[in-house]
Image (cartoon, helix red, strand yellow):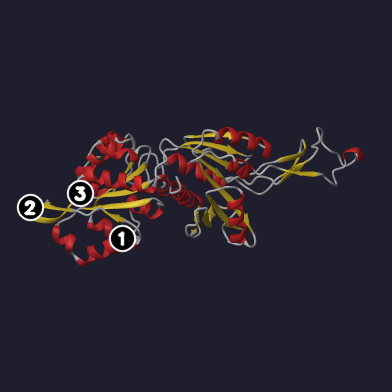
Amino acid sequence: MSAADLSSLRGRHIVLGISGGIAAYKSAVLVRCLVKAGAEVQVIMTPAAREFITPVTLSTLSGHAVITEFFTANTGEWHSHVDLGLWADAFVVAPATACTLAKMATGVADNMLVTSYLATRAKVFVAPAMDLDMMAHPSTTANLDTLRSRGVDIIEPAEGELASHLRGRGRMEEPEAIAAALARHFAAAGSLASRHVMITAGPTRERIDPVRYIGNFSTGKMGYALAAEAARRGARVTLVSGPVSEPVPAGVDVVRVESALEMLDAATRAAAEADICIFSAAVADYRPARPLAQKAKRESADRDITSVELVKNPDIAATLGSARRPGQVMVGFALETDHEAEAATAKLARKHLDMIVLNSLRDPGAGFGTDTNKVTMYFADGRTPVATTLKSKADIAADILTQTISLT
């Protein structure tokens, strides 16, 4: 397989789990193949796997220390299976022995490989490797069926001579073919390579005086999750961010703003070059007409702020939507509390958007300040709306970008 065929692996985080079978020697070739394609690989080995191939070999090839235990013996350092699971863009077990498949299917979390599998949110692949009779045994077949029903991709074993010197089905698929399966997955999931994505995120603050402002409860979590996912898919990302405390995702250029007018200016400049514009910021609808240069004090009658005259802020999505270039994709957000579908579809048309993402504050776990979300996506081309279940904002970001890419 040519290097070009594996281009979708570039920049991907791949956890490779190796269990204890003779086919573990092939894992060294798989690591080299993935790293050569530009992926970052973290290897986890079961204790039995160390009898077939050394951690030193795999660490040298991957560029990362190999994890085999929950703790490092000499330092007591804990290896977080949760962090590994969240880091991964794909989780691959190759070889996957009958024992490891059984543990994955039944949740027997007695080693780092299985605990990390149970914690991951990434797509999971297994490449079984065992003797032909073990492969054909009803328990193995049932475990594979269970994993398949949970969304795990089975990279089917090949037929040939096995370690027992018998011939039959049970040989782990070749490393190049496993890498190609991963590349096809990422290509199908949607690449944003060579695309420029502009995303607005967070709230705006509209100053009343130097210490007070009008704002909202947005934390920017959804917009930052979108920026992280777009960068993972290869995009050049410009994140126009209001005041939030979220860390900037790797590979993302951030432009920090405070007010709606500042956000409009920054977003207009970024949109001039962007292929995709996603307006996820919670922009204040109004701002004080005459903000005070000095702090208004309760004791000063001339600076009484018991009433503040407000003026409308520009609608950033509508402004840029009406000035969009041919072929430019525009995605907006709508946060509603009643008549949600009607309000969202009206905004979709009024703002000249291709897609609008509806949040309802009536859905528990969705909206401002949460790590989860539940959305419905509506489309200007009349296709059937797409609704998600409640899940992490990182997963929602992946869903939104998958739909966005379908519009390009």
Mark 2: which amino acid?
A: His
Q: Position of residue 175 (x, y in %)?
A: 22, 43
> Mark 1 against mark 2, which lies toward the viewer?
1
Q: Would you place residue 55 above or below residue 97 in this image?
A: above
Mark 1 or mark 2: name the one nearer the start of the chain: 1
**Of all residues shown, which one is farthest toward the right?**
301
Residue 148, labelled with which disc? 1
Kindly tell me whether residue 105 is visible in this rendering.
Answer: yes
| Foreground residue among 189 and 82 | 189
Mark 3: which amino acid?
A: Glu
Q: Would you place residue 273 above or below residue 366 in this image?
A: above
| Foreground residue among 110 and 398 | 398
Q: Position of residue 208 (x, y in %)?
A: 78, 40
Residue 115, labelled with which disc? none
- Disc 2 designates what residue? 165
In the picture provided, is 95 more to the left or to the right than 368?
Answer: left
- For marks 3 and 2, give the CA distance: 17 Å
Q: Tell me where residue 214 sits by quadrant.
A: top right
